[in-house]
Amino acid sequence: MKILSDFDGVLTDPSPEAARVKEVFYNHFITLPGTSQPQMSELWEQAQNQLIHSPHQHGWKSGEKITAYANEDGFIECNGLAACLDDMVSKAEKRSLNVQNSLKQKEFSNFCEMSQFAFNEVVKETSAGRHHPLDPSAAIVFQTLLSRGIEIVIVSNSGTERITNLFLQRCPGLLQSSENRLRIRGGAQKFVLGENSDSFEVGPYVVHTDRPKYQTILVEEKPDIILGDVFSLDLALPLQLARRKLHGFEKVRLLMRKRNYSPQWSTAYFSHTKGVSCGLFESLDDLLALI
């Protein structure tokens, strides 16, 4: 048996890191040279209100499409906030010139770049031991699964180095004793969307499933079970493959870790999907009974 698991959100609690990304982003945003704090504070609040009142219109962008929605986790919220700010600034002519010149002074082309910078800064903080996001149960649960002869492949947008460092910091024995049945494929780029319009709707949310880089990994690995927490990024594509009985995915099991940030629209849709084996779990310990 082979399990393909996401990392952030499945094996970690991403909320403290995401809150820190937002803090770093805000600190750079509010102090842009040539702008006033009241002006920037108002702009920030307007963008946050848009995310709250129309979440289906905001999120992490891949080209012109939303690849994951701002309410699916804290990291994506920051991406969605940045994209919203860029859109607002581009529509406000007088403010646009002022803010864009300020961004250039900080060597950013837009707020999405500033948000990515904030994320990278927090990755450095975590690597230095400032944050400890790894789930305390990760080591024992994965070690138990490996002892059963199960192969585990961690497939994540996060870099392989970040994932490896966190394991080495908190549970080095897991990597050392896995007998090559635990592999890490970081930098998976699940967020990259292709050019076709393959998608399905969940209420007002349009969930895109043309994810060529992620699909290549899925087809190469052919897992029996897939674990994820962000529906759009981790589970929507394999769900679509299973529905269409493509690439040998007709018998795949999909399990979503329900977190306190998981939006109701995605968990409700996922848990009521027919024709595909889908389930929710709230803690890593629950996996041992499910697998």
Image (cartoon, rainbow, N blue to C red):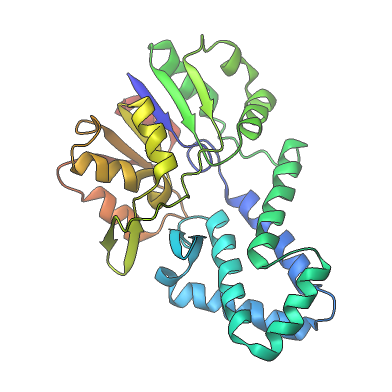
* Up-down relation of residue 124 to residue 196 (above or below): above
Screen quadrant of the C terminus:
top left
* Up-down relation of residue 209 to residue 275 (above or below): below
Work out which residue is located at the far bottom of the displayed protein and give it: 94
Determine which quarter of the picture holds residue 21.
bottom right
Q: Nearer the viewer, residue 92 or 15?
A: 92
* Up-down relation of residue 19 to residue 215 (above or below): below
Q: Nearer the viewer, residue 194 or 147?
A: 194
Screen quadrant of the N terminus:
top left
Location of residue 165 in the rendering, given as x and y in whole percent from the top left corner: 68, 29
- In the image, what residue occupies the spot 47% across and 22% down? 142
Work out which residue is located at the far front of the displayed protein and give it: 195
How many numbered tags mark residues here? Answer: 0
Tell me if 195 is positioned left or right of 168 in this view: left
Location of residue 160 in the rendering, given as x and y in whole percent from the top left corner: 60, 31
Q: Is residue 22 visible?
A: no
Tell me if 276 is positioned left or right of 261 in this view: left
- In the image, what residue occupies the spot 57% across and 61% down? 79
* Up-down relation of residue 85 to residue 162 (above or below): below
Location of residue 263 in the rendering, given as x and y in whole percent from the top left corner: 40, 59
Tell me if 47 is positioned left or right of 57 in this view: right
Q: Is residue 268 visible?
A: yes
Location of residue 239 in the rendering, given as x and y in whole percent from the top left corner: 27, 44
Work out which residue is located at the far left of the displayed protein and give it: 275
